[in-house]
Amino acid sequence: MRGMVPNDPLTHVSDFQFAVIYAPRKKRTRFPASCVTLFDSLEEAAAAEAPDKKRYAAKVHGPSKSSEGQFIYYLQNWL
């Protein structure tokens, strides 16, 4: 994906993580950090999912800094 920062195995600054994303529309591939809640495991993210409130479990990559200076996460896949 264009703009995605590759994994850094030495520091783990930008890495794959499980999260719940507030997403009014699920067509986006980048989300600001304010819309992302990180979890330690797939099970925790799945348990926190609330589709009625537009909060969906996902695997994300990040954080990465956008050209506008915001921290963003890239969607790897919805869970």
Image (cartoon, rainbow, N blue to C red):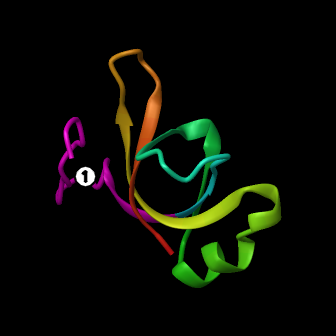
Q: In the image, is residue 22 part of the stretch drawn in magenta? A: no
What residue is at 41 percent from the left and 47 percent from the top?
Answer: 29
Q: In the image, is residue 12 part of the stretch drawn in magenta? A: yes
- Nearest the viewer among 14 and 10 is 14
- Nearest the viewer among 26 and 5 is 26
Where's residue 7, x and y in %? 20, 54
**Vertically, is 22 above or below 17?**
above
**Vertically, is 43 above or below 21?**
below
The residue under label 1 is 11
Where's residue 78, x and y in %? 48, 68
What residue is at 73 percent from the left and 56 percent from the top?
Answer: 54
Residue at the outermost right position = 52
Where's residue 35, x and y in %? 63, 43
Magenta span: chief secondary structure: loop
Where's residue 43, x and y in %? 60, 84
- Nearest the viewer among 11 and 30 is 30
Residue 66: image quadrant is: top left
* Span highlighted in magenta in the image: 1-18
Helix, strand or loop under label 1: loop
Identify which amino acid the numbered label 1 is placed on. Thr
Residue at the outermost bottom position = 43
Residue 63: image quadrant is: top left
